[in-house]
Image (cartoon, rainbow, N blue to C red):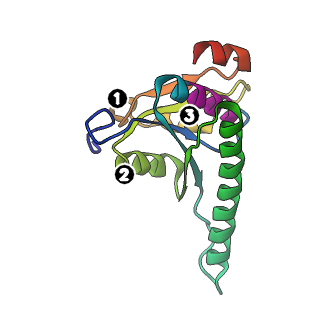
Amino acid sequence: MGKPRRAYEAGHHAKFLAIVDDTPECERAIHFAARRAVRTGVSLVLLCIKPEADMQDWLGVGDVMRAEAEDDAAAALDRAAAYVRGMVGLEPECATRIGVLADELVKFIDDDEDIALLVLAAGTGSDGPGPLVSALASRAAASFPVPVAIVPGHLSTEEIDALA
């Protein structure tokens, strides 16, 4: 079990966390999280997790691959943050992690005791709800450190706005 949540204690400020990735449903989760954060007066954190390079560090190749992954993550976060700013005028906190998706997500949440909610969106394709929802479902959901809100991927922007 991770650190206790302190988001609503004196000296702390609650945060919603949304994951930035290459899935089609990513924008749905960010949209809901941003709208809900503004409505409830909490902060928004955007996290991009890139996988660790499988190659061994041979003549600096590993360092180059890591730098490329970090650059890709920074570009994705910049686009997502611009979307949030344009939509609701909120300046999100942005963070990058390199490693195994589910492991890095749990570590990130453990490191920030103000995260009060993880917002994900389910995919609408025939291959299941999406990699992140599937990864979290494979972990013991009962022991996850914060509540998880899953936005149905089929909801339109207008429907999300009405719900958030």
Using a 10 Å C-alpha cutoff, classify the residue at mark 1 as few (fewer than 14 neighbours), some (14 to 19) or many (20 or more): few
Residue 62 in the image, given as x and y percentages of width and height: 62, 75
Does the image show residue 156? no
For label 3, the residue is 134
Q: Say left or right for 146 vs 1.
A: right
**Inter-mark Cα distance, 2 to 3:** 23 Å
Q: Is residue 27 magenta?
A: yes
Which mark lies nearer to you, 2 or 3?
2
Hey, what amino acid is under mark 3?
Ser
**Which residues are drawn in magenta?**
25-35
Taking the spot 64% from the left edge, 35% from the top edge, the residue there is 89
Residue 142: assigned label: 1
Q: Quadrant of the N terminus?
A: top left
Asked if disc 1 and disc 3 are in contact, CB closer than 8 Å, the reply is no
Q: Say left or right for 44 vs 81.
A: left
Instruction: Name the one closer to the observer, 6 or 42.
Output: 42
Does the image show residue 71? yes
Q: Quadrant of the C terminus?
A: top right
